[in-house]
Image: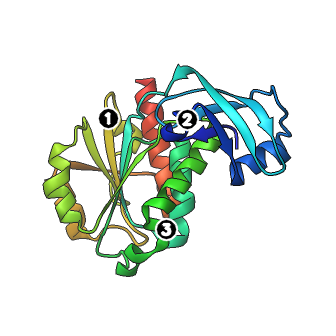
Amino acid sequence: MNLLLLGPEEAAEGRLRLFGRRAAHLLRVLKVAPGDRPRAGVVNQGIGEAVVVAVGRDWVDVEVALHRGAEPLPPVDLLLAVPRPKVVRRLLADLAALGVGAIHLTNAWRVERSYFASPTLTPEAIGRALRLGLEQAGAVRLPQVVVHHRLMAFLDDTLPALQHERCLVAHPAATTPIAAAAGAGRSLIALGPEGGWIEREVETLRERGFEPVSLGTRVLRTETAAVVAVACLTACTAGG
């Protein structure tokens, strides 16, 4: 944990008593004492420090002071066919650490319908995974995560209201490298499930303005492809 992350409702309390995982880290790893000032942040608000006021056997009292605002909204959003449940938790944490604006989890032809009943897709589980990623990265900008049970509903109802300078779809047959398609402004990158999008889905995405792009010649796992795509688009946007 490289950042003590608090929710806005917690920070609003002024002096806050922490229990559980965060208190254990402060006590056993950082070995804090009254007067110490570990790095802290408040979700979507800013970064500063937590002044340790008092400590107990399993609790820590802190007061949080923010010194700067939250980092800018990351320039990349992700449309992701729901991965296997055991992948979801660590992938969400990795994406939050890397920095992504919104994650749209969608159904697709090759997505098992049972995935949507997984406990990893509950709001509580998603929130925990995202916060772990932010703590690792020392960041506070929480990605928005939306679960869509139908890809077509996303494309017809949600996509038109979103604002992106470009929409891309990763596809092994594409000849345009993802870096060549990047540029200034916001990007939405669509990644299929294990086994990839079926051709009908790719054609539907193309009809909605998605440009097929390549992540290279090697076959990548979903979690690897997602990180590569987001990292590449983010770096190219910053460089542009």
Q: Is residue 208 left or right of residue 22?
A: left
Element marked by disc 3: helix
Q: Amino acid at mark 1?
A: Arg
User: Disc 1, disc 2: CB below 8 Å?
Assistant: no
Q: Amino acid at mark 2?
A: Glu
Residue placed under numbered mark 1 in the picture? 186
Front position in the image: 92 or 200 = 92
Q: Which mark is residue 2?
A: none
Q: Is residue 219 visible?
A: no
Disc 1 packing (10 Å; few <14; some 14–19; many ≥20): many
Q: Amino acid at mark 3?
A: Thr
Identify the residue shown where x is 49% and y is 28%.
70
Identify the residue shown where x is 67% and y is 42%.
17
* Among numbered discs 1 and 2, the one appearing first in the sequence: 2
Element marked by disc 1: loop
Identify the residue shown where x is 82% and y is 45%.
56
- Marks 3, 1: nearer the viewer: 3
Residue placed under numbered mark 2 in the picture? 13
**Residue 226 in the image, given as x and y percentages of width and height:** 47, 53
Front position in the image: 199 or 94 = 94
* Among numbered discs 3 and 1, the one appearing first in the sequence: 3
Against 168, is 195 above or below?
A: below
**Quarter occupied by residue 204:** bottom left
* Among numbered discs 2 and 3, the one appearing first in the sequence: 2
**Residue 138 in the image, given as x and y percentages of width and height:** 62, 35
Against 69, is 160 above or below?
A: below
Residue placed under numbered mark 3 in the picture? 120
Q: Distance of mark 3 from mark 1, alpha carbons?
A: 28 Å
**Quarter occupied by residue 146:** bottom left
Disc 3 packing (10 Å; few <14; some 14–19; many ≥20): many
